[in-house]
C-alpha cells in the first residue's frame, strides 16, 4: 500500500513539475525569440582570431559601413550602403547559418559575408579623418537604421560591389541562381571611373607563375596556346577559360591572376601576355561607385536602392 502511495505521489509531482518545466522552456524560447526579433545585439565571428564579439546593431552597421565603403562618398550613397548592410545581416540571420559562424549571427569575412571593423580599427583606417568620418557614419546610420530592402516583405540578399563596366550582372549570370531582385541594370556612372579598367603586361615567366596556382594546368612549349577563352557573355563576363589544356572557371582564373573581376581578356603578342580587367567585384547588386554617382546627380538612397535591387521596396 505504501509503495502504491509513493508511486502515486511521484506521478503527481511529475504531473505538476513537467508543465512548469515546459512553461519555463517556453518562456526561455519566447525570450530568445523576442531578443532575436528586437536584435539588440549582433554577434560577429572575427576571422582574424576566431573569437565572437557582441555589439548592438547600430554599432554593427557603422562598422560594416566603414569596412565596406569609402566614407568620402555622398551621404545618400552611404545611406544606401547602410541599408544594404543591415538588410544583408537580417537575410543572413534568416538563413539559420549560425553553426557556420561558430554560433555567431554573421562573420566579418567580406569574402564570405560582409566586412565589419570596430572603433579601434576605424581609427587605424581613417587616421586624421577619424572624428570626421565617425560622425558622418553615425549620422548616416541613425538616419536609416532599421530599414531593410524587402521583396515580398522579406529581407533580400543585398549583395553589392565596388564597380562595374556600365551595367550590373544578374545573379543568374554570375552564380547560376536567379533572384527577381538581382537582375542586370544600367549603371552608367561606372564608366566614368578612373579605375574602370586595369591592364597588366606579363612576361612568359610571370604568366607561368600565376598559372602554377591552377591545379592541373600543363603549359606546352608554344606560349600562344597557353590560354583560350571558352565561355563569356556579351558584357565580357568570363565563365570559363582553358589554360594549359585544362578548363577552369573565370573565377578560378581571376583568383590565380589576382584580377579585380571576372570581366577580363587575355592577349598574346611578341612574347608578352596582356591581361585587361574591367570593374571591381562580382558586379551583382548595387554598385558603390554607381550609387555615389546617382547621389551626386540628385537621387536619394531609396531611389538608388530600388534601382539596383529591382522589384523591391524599403520597409
Image: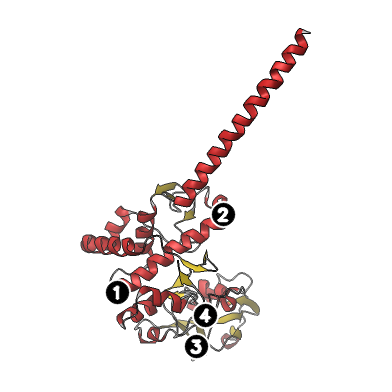
At numbered mark 1, what does the secondary structure look like: helix, strand or loop?
loop
User: Where residue 241 is drawn, which disc sits there?
Assistant: none
The residue pinned by badge 3 equals 271
Rounded to the nearest whole Å, what is the CA distance between mark 1 and mark 3?
45 Å
Rounded to the nearest whole Å, what is the CA distance between mark 2 and mark 3?
49 Å
At numbered mark 4, what does the secondary structure look like: helix, strand or loop?
loop
Lower sequence index among marks 2 and 3? 2
Which mark lies nearer to you, 2 or 3? 2
The residue at 65%/80% (across/down) is 245
- Number of numbered tags placed on the structure image: 4
Q: Report if residue 44 is visible in the image.
A: no
User: Where residue 97 is drawn, which disc sits there?
Assistant: 2
The residue pinned by badge 4 equals 169
Lower sequence index among marks 3 and 4? 4
Which one is in front, 84 or 302? 302
Q: Residues within 10 Å of mark 3 (few under 14, many from 20)?
A: few
Rounded to the nearest whole Å, what is the CA distance between mark 2 and mark 1?
34 Å
Residue 199, placed above or below residue 157: below
For the C terminus, the image quarter is bottom left
Residue 29, placed above or below residue 309: above
Q: Is residue 305 left or right of residue 172?
A: left
Lower sequence index among marks 2 and 1? 1
Residue 66, placed above or below residue 185: above
Lower sequence index among marks 1 and 4? 1
Rounded to the nearest whole Å, what is the CA distance between mark 1 and mark 4?
24 Å
Lower sequence index among marks 2 and 4? 2
Which one is in front, 113 or 41? 41
The residue pinned by badge 1 equals 74
Which mark lies nearer to you, 3 or 4? 4
Amino acid at each position: 500500500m505504501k509503495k502504491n502511495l509513493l508511486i502515486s505521489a511521484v506521478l503527481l509531482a511529475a504531473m505538476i513539475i513537467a508543465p512548469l518545466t515546459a512553461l519555463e522552456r517556453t518562456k526561455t524560447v519566447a525570450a530568445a525569440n523576442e531578443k532575436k526579433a528586437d536584435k539588440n545585439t549582433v554577434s560577429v565571428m572575427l576571422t582574424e582570431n576566431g573569437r565572437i564579439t557582441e555589439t548592438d546593431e547600430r554599432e554593427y552597421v557603422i562598422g560594416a559601413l566603414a569596412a565596406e565603403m569609402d566614407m568620402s562618398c555622398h551621404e545618400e550613397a552611404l545611406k544606401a550602403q547602410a541599408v544594404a548592410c543591415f538588410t544583408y545581416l537580417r537575410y543572413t540571420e534568416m538563413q539559420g547559418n549560425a553553426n557556420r559562424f561558430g554560433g555567431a549571427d554573421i562573420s566579418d569575412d567580406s569574402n564570405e559575408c560582409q566586412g565589419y571593423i570596430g572603433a579601434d580599427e576605424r581609427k587605424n583606417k581613417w587616421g586624421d579623418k577619424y572624428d570626421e568620418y565617425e560622425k558622418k557614419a553615425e549620422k548616416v546610420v541613425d538616419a536609416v537604421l532599421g530599414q531593410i530592402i524587402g521583396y515580398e516583405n522579406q529581407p533580400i540578399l543585398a549583395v553589392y560591389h565596388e564597380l562595374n563596366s556600365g551595367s550590373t550582372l544578374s545573379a543568374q549570370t554570375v552564380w547560376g541562381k536567379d533572384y527577381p531582385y538581382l537582375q542586370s541594370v544600367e549603371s552608367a556612372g561606372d564608366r566614368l571611373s578612373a579605375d574602370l579598367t586595369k591592364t597588366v603586361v606579363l612576361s612568359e615567366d610571370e604568366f607561368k607563375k600565376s598559372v602554377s596556382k591552377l591545379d592541373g594546368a600543363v603549359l606546352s612549349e608554344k606560349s600562344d596556346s597557353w590560354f583560350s577563352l571558352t565561355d563569356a557573355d556579351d558584357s565580357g563576363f568570363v565563365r570559363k577559360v582553358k589554360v594549359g589544356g585544362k578548363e577552369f572557371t573565370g573565377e578560378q582564373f581571376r583568383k590565380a591572376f589576382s584580377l579585380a573581376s571576372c570581366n577580363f581578356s587575355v592577349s598574346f603578342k611578341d612574347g608578352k601576355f596582356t591581361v585587361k580587367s574591367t570593374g571591381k567585384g562580382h558586379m551583382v547588386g548595387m554598385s558603390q561607385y554607381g550609387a555615389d554617382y546617382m547621389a551626386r546627380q540628385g537621387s536619394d538612397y531609396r531611389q538608388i536602392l530600388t534601382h539596383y535591387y529591382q522589384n523591391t521596396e524599403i520597409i
